[in-house]
């Protein structure tokens, strides 16, 4: 009987500890994910926030040798240009400056919604025009963002 009681208490203590660790989110891989926004060499994400309703706020800095006009920007899981936010008057960003964009992220053909703590993996597509050359360009960033 003493043998069963000793092992019973040990199993009870282990199950309480494991359930406490589970409740703290230790077994959820999304707990350990860092948010990332990776653009090509001439652009960088200074910071970004994704709300549970799918609205992304991203501050993008440009380091090209010429000022640019951003004509459209979008956030999608499949790196397509559908559902991009276009600007009637382009957004001017001087050399070495940054701008904060507010846009909706999409998961395929529907607006992305998730609970806080979940992870969104998608792309930011930005259409811009180099003011000196007048040529249009597209920059695509990889986005791994935790919903806050």
Image (cartoon, rainbow, N blue to C red):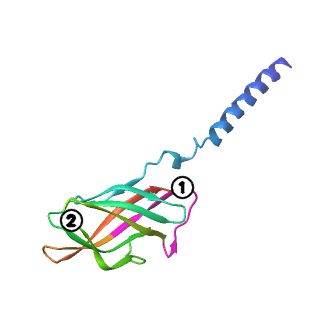
Quadrant of the rendered structure where residue 67 is? bottom left
* Image quadrant in which you'd find residue 52: bottom right
Q: Residues within 10 Å of mark 2 (few under 14, many from 20)?
A: some
For residue 8, above or below residue 79: above
Q: Position of residue 8 (x, y in %)?
A: 79, 27
Say which mark, if any, is on residue 118: 1
Q: Give me the C-alpha separation between circle 2 and circle 1.
A: 35 Å
Tags 2 and 1 in contact by the CB under 8 Å rule? no
* Residue to which mark 2 is pinned: 94
| Disc assigned to residue 84 | none
Left of 21 or right of it: where is 74? Answer: left
Q: Which callout, 2 or 1, points at the residue further toward the start of the chain?
A: 2
Query: Is 21 left or right of 126, judged from the image as shown?
Result: right
In this view of the protein, which residue sits in the foreground, 84 or 89? 89
SS for callout 1:
loop
Start-end of magenta stretch: 108-125
């Amino acid at each position: 009987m003493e043998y069963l009681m000793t092992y019973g208490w040990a199993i009870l203590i282990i199950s309480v500890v494991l359930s406490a660790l589970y409740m703290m989110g230790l077994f959820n891989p999304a707990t350990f994910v860092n948010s990332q926004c990776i653009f090509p060499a001439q652009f960088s994400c200074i910071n970004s926030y994704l709300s549970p309703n799918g609205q992304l706020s991203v501050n993008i800095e440009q380091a090209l040798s010429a000022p640019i006009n951003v004509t459209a920007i979008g956030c999608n899981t499949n790196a397509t240009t559908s559902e991009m936010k276009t600007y009637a008057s382009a957004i001017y960003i001087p050399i070495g400056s940054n701008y904060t964009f507010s846009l909706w992220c999409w998961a395929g053909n529907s607006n992305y919604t998730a609970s806080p703590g979940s992870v969104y993996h998608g792309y930011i597509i930005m259409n811009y025009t180099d003011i000196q050359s007048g040529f249009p360009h597209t920059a695509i960033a990889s986005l791994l963002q935790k919903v806050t």
